[in-house]
Every structure is written in structure tokens, then in C-alpha cells.
């Protein structure tokens, strides 16, 4: 049997490994029913063998923490995002992706003990209904890349109908809106898409939905009452970046009203030093790795500050002129950059986490 | 290959020196000649039978010393193919290998690779040259065999460090030809060679440009024509390439250094920007050895405190 019923990025899945403990779980049964004809193997004690190309799926009985803090550092302002951890790795191979350095393999891992996952979240979110949470699934994987086979995003949306103190962000480079009909409170779900210059989307995000498709989906969500999030991350410095990012800002303004957007993040391409060689090995055409990077205070390589500020000013300026100024924030940036571009620092506005929490909850 | 046990006494002048397998012929220095004068030639040279006489296979330096002293040269006859004789030469020179430059080792590997093919040269001869099969060093030497003559010439002359192979492999044919002339006038240190090539290539890649166009600019050509000493010439080229690779950082550092130089003049304070201009912070350090030094440092700091230059230092990266 073929996988033609699935989106193109999932049709090349060639084998599935399953932990014995989750073989009969509802998640495993669902995934396997949607992958007819794909060979299934029992995962043993040895690491699941990958093929280096993201064609292997591993339904894992995960024993770690399902609710985590985003791995920020104290030297730069972190947004305080909490991670609802549903799996690891991504079927895309975006040239800049940090996951290339985070994980040793490209095996797509799904935590198939979803009962344990929801129990952990229920315990955390139910402990104090007055405590608000802003969570997302798009840190160690794309929130919706595997949605056609796992339905994890939809399950989570439905689960959180019982937890109005939680606002869920689903961050993706794909268009999958199947979760929408399961959301009882559109004001508690923030569909989010990664934004970039059209040239970067076309050349560095192979297999992802186009910018036009993402923004059209965002508009669909907005028209259904959801507020959306947009993430310019990573912003890439490449010849012609000015025109490229200006074009993206124009496209955003063509598709969305400022009131339909909860927040827009700006994050410059930054990476662990070892990622450069990995990128060059996997994507030798990625000339942006030769930008003027310096070691930041968190030991990651960042574009030298004046060049970052230059890019941020152009993008933020365009978004401000289009009315999106109030929604802007920086992902992992210094007070110096905040002041230079936006004229204030997060500390001066009550803290970034608190500000985004308010924006997420529509306050 | 066969080496006869009999030791012959041969007139050095009768040996046709520099056979094809004599890869690293070396003139004897006075110390060597003196040693031969005192003790004679204790280790017979190797010769092959050729045209009714003998041709030297190993022992060039000993033969020349014997000739200079007018003494007969002890020799053993070796029989084998050209590559076997050359291998015997390497074995005979095993004690020298640790002190030979990389260019000479590459010369030998290249000679064998042309005769036997690369794989056999690496497997059989590599260990004689200190190249463990499969090792990083062996891979580096192997990669050099693919380099064009224009670069190989400088590597063999030990002007172009073999460690540059990693960055040269990332270049295309035209790029390799464009960098080759920069290794003609001077012997480069390993660090300078790698940095220069890396900065040039990455500056070009960042701008979607061409190596030939960048290196054709007058600021590079002028250094080549300058007649500077090797140390100064290579340093100047490195500085030029670094400026092209990191124009913003270089300019910020220069502006910061210029401003701080005047500020700290006459004091023992050192002023630095500690974090690549990620912050506006300025770091001051001083080393104090005694009470007088402490008093001077405090006084110097007090003198600096009111300077308007501080504002400039804090804002160097803000205004860029």
C-alpha cells in the first residue's frame, strides 16, 4: 500500500519502531492505522537505527518530563515559554535547524504513552486553576508536522478545553488545520507559523509549506476567531535580505489585521559553534553561515550586534508601520538590542514572560 | 627485493649519484664529514647494478663525504624494482623521517603514488613516512595528492603548510589557482596560512563573490609587491583578509582601541570590550605589585573617571 493519502513530507516514512510498553496504546494504534504497509519493528535496548534522512518513526514510551521550561539563558531575555513535550525531531531538513546539533540522529520520535503525557499535564495545570500557562509543542519538533498520523495537536487542543488557564501555541511550517474543530475556546489556542524571507523559505526550508500557504492558513484561523502568532526566527543575513524581509512584512499585512495577531517574535540566527560544520556538511549551499558571527554571552554564535540591530530595525519598522508594533518581541535578545530597536527593555515593561502571557490570554 | 650480504669497497666517484629513488638527497655538513673522518662509514650505502657499474640507491650524504675525504665507500648491492629500491631508500633513511618537513614526506608519497597508485602508496609506504593508514594525517597527505601543481609546488617547498588542505578542499579549481600566488614569496606559518585562506574563502562565500575578484584587489596585490619580510608580509595579508571577513567587528575593535588608548594613556590600566560588543560593557584591569602601584592605579582611575571618552566607549557598537 502507498502513503498517498498523507502529505508529501510523510510519504517517505519507511519503517516504524515501537516500544513494547506502548504497542497497544491508542496513539500507537492510531499511527499504525494511518501508515498501512509500513514495516513495524519492536524497539529493543539498542538505539533505534535511523537512516539519516528522517524516514524512521519511533513510537516511544517516554519516561522524561512532559512539561518543561524553554532552555533560555540568563544573559538574554527569555520569553518564559513552557514546552509540552510530545516528541523529538522533524521530517523537514531546514538547513539552519538547531535540531541537527541537538539530536544524534534524525529518527522521528513520538511519545506514544500519551496517557502519561496528559496525566502529567492534567496534574500540573489542574493544581492551581488561577495560575496561567503559555505552552507550546514546537520546541523540539514541529507542532504539526506529524499531525496527519498522530493527531497529537488535536488531542492536546481537546484536552486543554478543560484547562482554560492554559493557552496553547501550535508552531509549525506546515498547514494542518484539523485540530481547529476540536477547540472549544479559540481564545486559548494560538496557531503559529514560522516566517522568513521568501528566498529563505524557498531555498533553506525544503518541503515546508510556502509563505503564502502559511499566511493563508493564518488568515483562515483568524477568521475562525483564533489569534495567530508569527515567528521571524531565524532571521538570516544574506545578500538581498532587505528586500526579502520587506516582502514578507508586506505579505503579512496583506493577509492579517493587527488585531488578529497575538504576538510576533524576532530572532536572529544563532547557533552552537559546532552547528556551522554540521550545516556545511548537510547543506553546503547555505552561504549565510559565513555571516559575521561572534560568540555571544551564552556561548552561541550570533551575528555581530550592529548587523542584528540593522535587520531587526528593518523588519520591526515595517511591522510597526503596518500596525503590528504592539505584538513585537525578541527571542533571546539583550537589553541593548531591545532598546536600540524598540526603545524599551522587557524589564521596563513588566518582564517579557508576563507581557507575552497577557498577550496570549488577550489581555 | 634482494640485498646481498657482501660488502663492496667502491670509489665514490664511480657511483652515479641521485638515482630516481633518492628522494631526499642532502649535502653533508662539516660535522658529518668530521665524523666520517674519525670513524669511517660504519653503515654501508646501497647500490644497484647498472650498465656494468653501480648506481646509488641510498647513502648520498655518505658518498659525498667519502668523496670529499678521498676514501672508498662501503656498499651493499640491492636488487629490485624501482619502487622496491625507493622503499629501501626510505628504510635506510628511517632515522631522518621524524625531523623531515612535511613537504619532503609529501614528495615521497607523491612519487610512490605516481608509480604504484595512491592506495598502495598509502598502505605500503605511508607507514614508512609516519602515516598510519586511515589516520587523519594520512588522509591529509592523501588529499594533497589531488591538489594542482600550482599549490603542490608551494607545499613541497614548505611555503604552504599541509594543514591548509581542509580549506583548500572547499575551494574549486579557479579558487585554488587564485590563492596559489600568495604562497610564492613567503613560507607561511600553519596558523596564518589556515586563517588567511579561511577568511578569504568565507568573505567571498558570504558575499556570493569570487576569490579571484577579492584577491585581485589592490590591497592584496600591494602586499604581494611590498617586499616585506615573511613574518610581516603574511601578517599583513592575514590582517587584510580578516578585515574583509569581519568588517564590522574589525572596525568596532579599532574604534574601541583608538578611543581607549587616549583614555588610559599614562596609567597602568588595561581597557577592553569583553564580549564582542554584545553589551555596552567596558572591562578595566590592572596588575598591582605593591602599595605604590595600588596608589598609582587608584590615582590613574580617578584621572580617567571624568573623561567624555567613556560615553564613546560604551556606545561604539550602538552607532555602528
Image (spheres, rainbow, N blue to C red):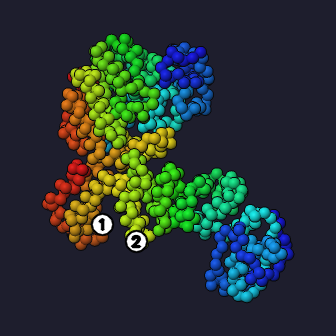
Mark earlier in primary sequence (2, 1): 2
Q: Relative to A34, is A338 above or below?
A: below
Q: Relative to B94, is A205 above or below?
A: above
Question: Disc 2 and disc 1: Cα gap in Å?
Answer: 36 Å
Q: Is residue A16 left or right of residue B61?
A: left
In the image shown, does A363 or B92 lie closer to the viewer?
B92
Which of the 4 image quarters holds residue B298?
bottom left
Chain letter of disc 1 in the image:
B
Image coords of residue A48 (percent x, y): 58, 30
Question: Which residue is found at the position 38% from the left and 61% from the top?
Answer: B220
Q: Residues within 10 Å of mark 2 (few under 14, many from 20)?
A: some
Q: Is residue B309 left or right of residue A20?
A: left
Residue underneath mark 1: B287
Which of the 4 image quarters holds residue B225?
bottom left
Image coords of residue A272 (percent x, y): 42, 43
Q: Is residue B69 left or right of residue A253?
A: right
Helix, strand or loop under label 1: loop
Question: Which residue is found at the position 74% from the left and 62% from the top?
Answer: B83
Question: Which residue is found at the position 25% from the left and 55% from the top?
Answer: B282
Image coords of residue A126 (percent x, y): 35, 19
In the image shown, does A294 or A247 lie closer to the viewer?
A247
Q: Relative to B145, is A150 above or below?
A: above
Residue underneath mark 2: B228
Mark drawn on residue A316? none
| Viewport quadrant of the C terminus of chain A | top left
Answer whether labels 2 and 1 touch (C-beta < 8 Å). Answer: no
Amino acid at each position: 500500500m502507498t502513503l498517498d493519502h498523507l502529505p508529501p513530507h510523510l510519504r517517505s516514512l519507511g519503517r516504524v519502531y515501537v516500544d513494547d510498553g506502548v504497542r497497544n496504546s491508542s496513539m500507537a494504534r492510531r499511527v499504525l492505522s494511518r501508515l498501512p504497509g509500513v514495516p513495524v519493528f519492536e524497539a529493543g535496548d539498542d538505539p533505534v537505527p535511523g537512516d539519516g534522512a528522517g524516514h524512521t518513526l519511533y513510537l516511544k514510551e517516554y519516561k522524561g518530563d512532559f512539561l518543561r521550561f524553554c532552555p533560555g539563558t540568563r544573559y538574554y531575555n527569555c520569553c518564559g515559554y513552557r514546552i509540552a513535550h510530545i516528541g523529538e525531531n522533524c521530517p523537514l531538513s531546514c538547513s539552519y535547524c538547531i535540531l541537527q546539533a541537538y539530536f544524534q540522529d534524525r529518527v522521528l520520535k513520538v511519545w506514544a504513552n500519551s496517557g502519561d503525557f496528559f496525566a502529567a499535564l492534567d496534574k500540573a495545570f489542574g493544581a492551581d486553576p488561577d495560575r496561567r500557562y503559555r505552552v507550546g509543542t514546537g520546541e523540539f519538533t514541529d507542532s504539526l508536522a506529524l499531525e496527519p498520523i498522530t493527531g497529537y495537536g488535536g488531542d492536546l487542543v481537546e484536552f486543554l478545553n478543560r484547562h482554560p488557564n492554559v493557552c496553547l501555541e501550535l508552531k509549525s511550517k506546515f498547514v494542518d488545520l484539523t485540530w481547529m474543530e476540536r477547540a472549544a475556546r479559540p481564545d486559548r489556542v494560538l496557531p503559529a507559523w514560522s516566517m522568513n524571507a521568501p528566498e529563505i523559505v524557498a531555498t533553506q526550508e525544503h518541503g515546508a509549506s510556502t509563505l503564502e500557504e502559511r499566511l493563508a492558513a493564518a488568515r483562515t484561523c483568524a477568521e475562525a476567531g483564533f489569534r495567530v502568532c508569527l515567528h521571524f526566527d531565524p532571521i538570516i543575513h544574506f545578500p538581498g535580505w532587505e528586500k526579502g524581509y520587506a516582502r514578507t512584512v508586506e505579505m503579512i499585512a496583506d493577509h492579517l489585521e493587527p488585531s488578529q495577531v497575538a504576538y510576533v517574535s524576532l530572532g536572529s540566527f544563532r547557533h552552537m559553534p559546532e552547528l556551522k560544520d554540521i550545516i556545511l556538511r548537510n547543506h553546503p549551499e547555505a552561504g549565510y553561515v559565513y555571516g559575521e558571527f561572534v560568540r555571544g554571552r551564552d556561548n552561541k554564535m550570533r551575528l555581530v550586534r550592529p548587523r542584528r540591530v540593522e535587520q531587526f530595525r528593518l523588519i520591526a519598522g515595517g511591522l510597526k508601520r503596518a500596525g503590528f508594533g504592539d505584538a513585537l518581541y525578541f527571542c533571546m535578545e539583550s537589553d541593548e538590542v531591545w532598546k536600540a530597536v524598540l526603545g524599551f527593555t522587557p524589564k521596563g515593561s513588566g518582564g517579557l514572560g508576563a507581557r507575552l502571557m497577557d498577550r496570549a490570554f488577550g489581555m | 627485493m634482494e640485498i646481498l650480504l657482501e660488502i663492496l669497497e667502491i670509489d665514490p666517484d664511480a657511483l652515479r649519484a641521485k638515482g630516481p629513488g633518492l628522494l631526499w638527497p642532502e649535502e653533508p655538513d662539516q660535522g658529518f664529514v668530521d665524523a666520517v673522518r674519525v670513524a669511517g662509514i660504519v653503515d654501508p650505502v646501497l647500490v644497484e647494478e647498472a650498465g656494468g657499474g653501480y648506481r646509488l640507491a641510498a647513502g648520498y650524504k655518505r658518498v659525498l663525504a667519502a668523496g670529499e675525504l678521498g676514501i672508498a665507500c662501503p656498499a651493499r648491492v640491492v636488487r629490485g624494482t624501482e619502487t622496491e629500491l625507493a622503499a629501501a631508500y626510505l628504510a635506510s633513511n628511517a632515522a631522518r623521517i621524524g625531523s623531515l618537513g612535511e613537504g619532503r614526506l609529501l614528495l615521497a608519497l607523491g612519487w610512490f603514488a605516481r608509480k604504484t597508485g595512491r592506495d598502495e602508496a598509502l598502505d605500503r609506504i605511508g607507514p614508512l613516512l609516519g602515516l598510519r593508514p586511515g589516520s587523519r594525517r594520512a588522509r591529509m597527505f592523501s588529499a594533497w595528492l589531488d591538489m594542482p601543481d600550482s599549490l603542490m609546488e608551494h607545499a613541497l617547498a614548505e611555503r604552504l603548510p599541509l594543514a591548509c588542505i581542509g580549506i583548500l578542499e572547499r575551494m574549486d579549481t579557479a579558487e585554488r589557482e587564485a590563492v596559489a600566488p600568495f604562497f610564492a614569496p613567503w613560507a607561511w606559518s600553519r596558523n596564518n596560512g589556515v586563517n588567511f585562506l579561511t577568511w578569504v574563502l568565507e568573505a567571498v562565500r558570504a558575499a556570493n563573490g569570487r576569490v579571484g575578484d577579492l584577491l585581485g584587489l589592490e590591497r592584496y596585490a600591494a602586499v604581494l609587491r611590498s617586499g616585506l619580510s615573511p613574518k610581516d608580509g603574511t601578517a599583513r595579508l592575514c590582517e587584510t583578509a580578516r578585515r574583509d571577513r569581519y568588517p564590522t567587528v574589525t572596525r568596532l575593535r579599532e574604534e574601541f582601541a583608538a578611543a581607549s588608548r587616549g583614555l588610559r594613556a599614562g596609567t597602568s590600566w588595561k581597557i577592553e570590550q569583553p564580549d564582542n560588543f554584545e553589551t555596552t560593557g567596558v572591562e578595566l584591569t590592572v596588575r598591582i605589585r605593591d602599595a605604590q602601584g595600588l596608589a598609582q592605579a587608584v590615582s590613574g582611575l580617578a584621572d580617567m573617571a571624568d573623561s567624555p571618552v567613556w560615553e564613546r566607549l560604551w556606545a561604539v557598537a550602538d552607532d555602528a
